[in-house]
Amino acid sequence: MNPSDLFDQERQVRLAQYERDQAFSDLSKSWLQMSMQRKYVYNFDWLGRPIIQYPQDMVAIQELVWSVRPDLIIETGIAHGGSLVLSASLLAMLDLCDAIECGQTMDPRHSQRKVIGVDVDIRAHNRAAIEGHPMGSRIQMIQGSSVAGEIMAAVRQAASGFKRVMVFLDSMHTHDHVLAELDGYASLVTPGSYCVVFDTFVEDMPPRFFEDRPWDVGNNPKTAVRHWLKSHHEFEIDAAWPSKLMVTVAPDGFLRRKA
């Protein structure tokens, strides 16, 4: 066995052990809960823009983007724009790698890869910062409710012509809203790519953990995912991610469209 295959085999054995390690699982869940109470997730930037994600989930997104190599990433929920910039920078790196492999000089202005972000309220200072960012030319922002018919139509129009599409759902985290987003955007995901539904972890927290939010146990992204998958067998949960990350806001939220 060559060294690379041996390393991968050792990793798979280790990850399988994590799945059976209840103490590690309990500790990870406790750390997630305590860190959420302390707003740990608000502490990070990506290329200068605040990103409200755990580092583990950022790394997971990088791995997905590298393996799928999408032309388009659609995101619901913009906030400060850090996630849009993360996605755009990963697409820029794909372009750079493609150019190196082909022995070409890359002009990012001519790249077809881009990110579409949707948010009901794109605040002026955030819009200006995103548009002025070095990755801004790759980002298209659409303001409006992600579940409004005209907004979904606008996204579909903007997404036409792209061959490989990935979707991240991270706006309102109630059951009905996420269910509507899945109905509206998951069909844009190309076979072999992913629809990542963030904040499914809400179902695993104590009731009323988010006292000032409308979502709760029984009314959250995970309940929407479970309901939606019953009638959408073209998607499956990539169960490897929770045991690999141990700390993630998206347990059972990495939905892979079957090839």
Image (spheres, rainbow, N blue to C red):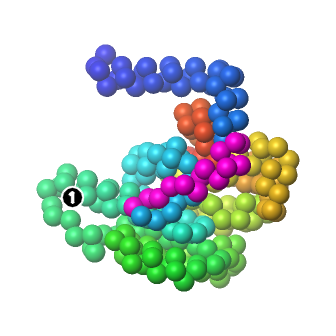
Q: Disc 1 marks which residue? A: 99
Query: Above or below — where is 14 with respect to 148?
Result: above
Is 113 magenta? The answer is no
Q: Quadrant of the rendered structure where residue 137 is?
A: bottom left
Task: Name the residue: 15% across, 64% down.
Answer: 105
The answer to which of 10 and 38 lies nearer the viewer is: 38
Magenta segment: 33-47
Task: Name the residue: 45% across, 76% down.
Answer: 129
Q: Residue furthest top?
A: 1
- In the rendered image, is residue 233 in sight? no
Q: Residue 22's spot in the image, x, y percent?
A: 69, 22
- In the rendered image, is residue 30 in sight? yes
Left-right relation of 57 to 228: left
The answer to which of 255 and 82 lies nearer the viewer is: 82
Query: Above or below — where is 201 with respect to 184?
Result: above
Q: Amino acid at mark 1?
A: Ala
Q: Residue 35's spot in the image, x, y percent?
A: 65, 45
Left-right relation of 94 to 82: left
Left-right relation of 31 to 109: right
Q: Residue 1's spot in the image, x, y percent?
A: 31, 16
Q: Quadrant of the rendered structure where residue 146 is?
A: bottom right
